[in-house]
């Protein structure tokens, strides 16, 4: 019996092991089904987590590493489980009589593998319940505001700083007349928070303007605080206020409010009032002293005009040394002119710049006499300011400059006007009629803008391609447009419902120009309609306007300019538009009109037709196109595919028919268009007329386009091309210029390539989703390129490679010499931008995302030394970059900004 017991123990162990292994075999099919079901649930869970992450990242949040790792594990196990399921299904199918394995060892191994994967899926599911998937990226404490050095504001600034340190002062009001320097002082206060130490948690800047809109102020604050979309969108004003309150009540903040015209209810916005607990501060600017009382400012500070010494210093700075030194009497005369300005900074700057071109004492003496015709003192009233600033207006040479200046007041306060948009309106109004060629008119328009900016009557916007009017200057322009206030209804500008009161049809009959923005058409328009003198009508972003009332256009019989852009709810253009026989400018951009009415064929005087971003436009009658005998400018940029109706037949290739018809329009010389087929592009290639007309070209989803190929003579003819976009041309393999000269790739005269033709005006190139495109060597023919954006080109290895043929002469060509912005996104094979360092004298930013094979930048220590502001990219890409030496790396490290992207 002693020898039997060990044998029984061994047998029991063998049985336990065999039984466990048998379970793997017996429960194989059951475990396979469980694994399949659990994997489906895990995938669904993964999709839910991924969607939450994407939503969070859209709100500038950063995903947690734990979540990122879990999602990667889900992808890995999904692939492994798929393989295991296939192997398991094969094993089940090989069984005899559905249950007996033919090969026990094979079934055992498979069953064990299935069981382990099932356990792994269970484990991964249990880890996937995340309460939080992303962290909020901390917002910047304060955003720097652009400004010049201040003159004469030091004492006032010190007084404000003292109030900011005083625990008993929470709200500070800065008031004074327009142009006295209130906004400049507020900018200085804002920027000093960057340069000095303090204990505030956040500084918020808001431009309020008039009419004050709670929702607009809330939106600016929300953007600064980075409140999530799910806590904001589709919420009421009160709910938004609650979210702002929830954030700010725990912070010590500074709120800077610029340009307040009436009491702003801070509690309604959601801003906690400063007190001795939160120690927050609110500083605002206004022209009206009573607003300081309405806002309950504990400290009211009036900004006075400059003392004579400070005023003279500011004036002389604007006049410039060249003019002051041109004659010995001018300095004495300059003191007299500065004295006439009564120390108002805006007047000193504006008139100083106007006088900068006057080099003789006689001109200065005449200017002094002109200034003395107006009231001698500035007492705080707008009219006094207007009369003094009117000198700058009167100094404008010619009626064209004056008309163009006054026209800018048609736009809302603080609105940044696109330069091209403004010039096209001037052309439509006939201000630039002395130029038969529209491109000459455009050049003159840019000169006008430059002159108005130089005279300080216009300012640059956030971009140099936009301008804006200071609110005082805009008020003065409207005052001038209405005959110095004598005919107040001559110009009517309305932004938002209730911006002005309708005072009877008789008054409306006087209107010559009317501009309605963000308004309800039904609320604003008088009944009955009657505008016999109206020349210009802007109906932009009008609420509820789906179609015009029957016969509407007969009530504006002499209108020349009709701008309906941005009125998204407008779906049809009816109302008897054929009655507008004097119409010269029509803008339908960003409307949802689906079909152009056949009546438009009667618009024989139409010179400018803009239909950009009209995604709903599907039908254009052929007669409409062919009847535009006076058309000079046609813009159908970023439109969608449309059809042309010809003799009852619907022709689906609308862009092809359109191009063919455009060739027959005698006066047409400015075209912006989107093309959708290779055939349309070939028509453009073969048409000398259209090449000379094209200004902006977008090739969108041209499935059959394999090669973007132009001859050198073609690109010389396309001298007006400013912008080129190519989107989703999946078969496009090459972009090239075929040389017609006999000597190689490069012209004999390098200066001819750089300055005379060859895409000389092309400044903006966008290439997106062209997976077969290898390089952009043709950019040698774009010496004026300012913005280059390339995304999702899977095979692209070089932007301009070693074999571009320009390596020995690139210094003369100035490759990328005007490039300001370079964006390279998701180019997995990109290795080189350019084979050797370039100066990049204009480069301000470069962004590189998902281009991990790009290991070097064409920089040396002399590249972009004065212009560069930012190098954006992923941390891992930046860490792998190779530099010529450590000196170059150190020179550019401070410009690097990390970009976070979802995997």
Image (cartoon, helix red, strand yellow):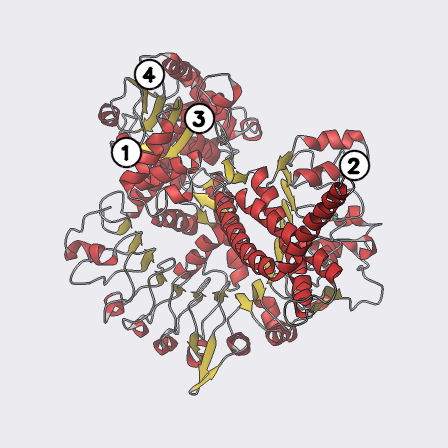
Mark 4 surroundings: few (<14), some (14-19) or many (≥20) residues within 10 A: few
Vertical position of residue 8 compared to residue 183: above or below:
below
Residue linked to disc 1: 261
Q: Is residue 547 above or below residue 432?
A: below
Report the front residue among 713 and 639.
639
Circle 1: element type: loop
* Residue 170 drawn at (x, y percent): 32, 18
**Left or right for 7, reference 768:** right
Write the residue at 60% across / 70% down: 702
Expressed as whole percent of the image width and height from the top left, the position of residue 382 reads 28, 33
Marks 4 and 3, the one that precedes in the sequence? 3
406 or 463, nearer to the observer = 463
Alpha-carbon distance for marks 3 and 1?
25 Å
Tag 2–tag 4 contact (CB < 8 Å): no
Q: Is residue 456 visible?
A: yes
Mark toward the start of the polypeptide (2 vs 4): 4
**Which badge, 1 or 2, is on the more N-terminal residue?**
1
- Considering depth in this image, is 190 or 334 the residue closer to the camera? 190
Distance of label 3 from label 2 (alpha carbons)? 38 Å
Q: Which residue is mark 2?
A: 883
Q: Position of residue 846 (x, y in %)?
A: 65, 43
Q: Are marks 4 and 1 in contact (CB under 8 Å)?
A: no
* Position above or below: 829 against 868: below
What is the number of the mark on residue 78?
none
Which of the image's four quarters has the N terminus? top right
User: Residue drawn 42% across and 56% down?
Assistant: 426
């Amino acid at each position: 019996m002693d020898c039997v017991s060990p044998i029984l123990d061994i047998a029991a162990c063998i049985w336990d092991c065999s039984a466990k292994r048998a379970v793997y075999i017996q429960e194989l099919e059951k475990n396979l089904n469980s694994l399949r079901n659990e994997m489906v649930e895990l995938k669904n869970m993964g999709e839910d987590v991924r969607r939450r992450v994407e939503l969070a990242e859209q709100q500038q949040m950063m995903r947690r590493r734990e979540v990122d790792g879990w999602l990667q594990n889900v992808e890995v196990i999904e692939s492994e489980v798929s393989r295991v399921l296939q192997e398991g299904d094969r094993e089940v199918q090989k069984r005899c009589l559905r249950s007996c394995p033919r090969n026990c060892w094979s079934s055992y191994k498979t069953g064990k593998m299935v069981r382990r994967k099932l356990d792994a899926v269970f484990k991964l599911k249990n880890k996937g319940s995340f309460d939080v998937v992303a962290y909020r990226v901390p917002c910047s404490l304060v955003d720097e505001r652009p400004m010049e050095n201040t003159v004469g504001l030091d004492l006032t600034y010190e007084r404000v700083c003292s109030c900011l340190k005083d625990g008993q002062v929470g709200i500070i009001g800065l008031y004074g007349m327009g142009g006295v320097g209130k906004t400049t002082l507020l900018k200085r206060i804002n920027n000093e928070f960057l340069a000095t130490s303090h204990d505030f948690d956040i500084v918020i800047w808001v431009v309020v303007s008039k009419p004050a809109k709670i929702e607009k102020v809330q939106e600016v604050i929300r953007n600064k605080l980075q409140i999530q979309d799910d806590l904001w969108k589709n919420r009421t004003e009160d709910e938004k206020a609650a979210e702002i309150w929830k954030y700010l009540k725990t912070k010590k903040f500074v709120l800077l409010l610029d340009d307040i015209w009436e009491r702003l209810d801070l509690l309604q916005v959601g801003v906690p009032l400063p007190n001795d607990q939160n120690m927050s501060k609110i500083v605002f600017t206004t022209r009206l002293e009573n607003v300081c009382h309405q806002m309950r400012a504990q400290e009211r500070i009036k900004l006075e005009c400059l003392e004579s010494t400070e005023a003279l210093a500011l004036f002389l700075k604007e006049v410039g040394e060249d003019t002051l030194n041109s004659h010995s009497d001018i300095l004495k005369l300059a003191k007299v002119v500065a004295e006439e300005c009564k120390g108002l900074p805006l007047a000193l700057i504006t008139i100083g710049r106007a006088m900068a071109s006057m080099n003789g004492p006689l001109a200065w003496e005449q200017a002094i006499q002109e200034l003395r015709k107006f009231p001698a003192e500035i007492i705080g009233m707008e009219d006094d300011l207007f009369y003094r600033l009117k000198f700058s207006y009167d100094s404008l040479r010619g009626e064209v400059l004056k008309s163009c200046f006054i026209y800018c007041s048609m736009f809302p306060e603080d609105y940044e006007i696109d330069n091209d948009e403004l010039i096209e309106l001037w052309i439509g109004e006939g201000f630039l009629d002395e130029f038969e060629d529209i491109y000459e008119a455009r050049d003159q328009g840019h000169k006008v803008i430059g002159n108005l900016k130089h005279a300080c009557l216009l300012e640059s916007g956030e971009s140099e391609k936009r301008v804006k009017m200071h609110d005082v200057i805009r008020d003065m322009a409207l005052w001038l447009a209405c005959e110095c206030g004598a005919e107040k209804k001559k110009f009517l500008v309305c932004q938002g419902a209730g911006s002005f009161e309708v005072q009877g049809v008789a008054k409306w009959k006087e209107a010559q120009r009317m501009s309605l923005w963000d308004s309800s058409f039904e609320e604003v328009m008088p009944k009955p309609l009657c505008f016999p003198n109206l020349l210009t009508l802007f109906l932009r972003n009008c609420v509820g306007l789906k179609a015009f009332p029957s016969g509407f256009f007969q009530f504006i019989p002499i209108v020349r300019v009709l701008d309906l852009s941005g009125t998204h709810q407008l779906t049809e253009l009816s109302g008897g538009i054929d009655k507008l026989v004097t119409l010269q400018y029509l803008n339908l951009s960003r409307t949802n009109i689906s079909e152009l009415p056949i009546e438009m064929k009667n618009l024989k005087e139409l010179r400018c037709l803009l239909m950009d971003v009209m995604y709903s436009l599907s039908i254009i009658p052929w007669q409409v196109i062919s009847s535009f005998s006076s058309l000079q400018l046609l813009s159908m940029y970023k439109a969608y595919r449309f059809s042309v109706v010809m003799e009852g037949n619907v022709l689906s290739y609308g862009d092809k028919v359109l191009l063919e018809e455009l060739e027959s329009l005698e006066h047409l010389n400015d075209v912006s268009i989107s093309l959708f087929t290779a055939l349309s592009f070939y028509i453009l290639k073969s048409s000398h007329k259209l090449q000379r007309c094209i200004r902006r070209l977008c090739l969108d989803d041209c499935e059959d386009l394999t090669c973007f190929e132009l001859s050198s003579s073609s690109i010389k003819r396309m001298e007006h091309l400013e912008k080129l976009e190519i989107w989703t041309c999946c078969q496009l393999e090459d972009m090239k210029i075929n040389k017609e000269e006999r000597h190689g790739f490069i012209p004999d005269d390098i200066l001819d390539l750089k300055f005379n033709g060859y895409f000389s005006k092309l400044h903006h190139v966008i290439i997106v989703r062209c997976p077969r495109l290898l390089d952009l060597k043709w950019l040698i023919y774009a010496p004026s390129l300012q913005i280059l954006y390339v995304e999702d080109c899977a095979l692209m290895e070089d932007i301009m490679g070693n074999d571009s043929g320009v390596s020995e002469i690139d210094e003369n060509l100035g490759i990328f010499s005007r490039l300001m912005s370079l964006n390279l996104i998701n180019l997995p094979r990109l290795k080189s931008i350019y084979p050797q360092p370039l100066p990049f004298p204009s480069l301000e930013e470069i962004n590189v995302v998902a281009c991990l094979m790009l290991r070097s930048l064409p920089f040396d220590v002399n590249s972009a030394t004065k212009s560069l502001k930012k190098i954006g990219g992923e941390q891992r890409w930046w860490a792998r970059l190779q530099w010529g030496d450590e000196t170059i790396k150190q020179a550019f490290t401070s410009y690097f900004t990390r970009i976070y992207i979802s995997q």
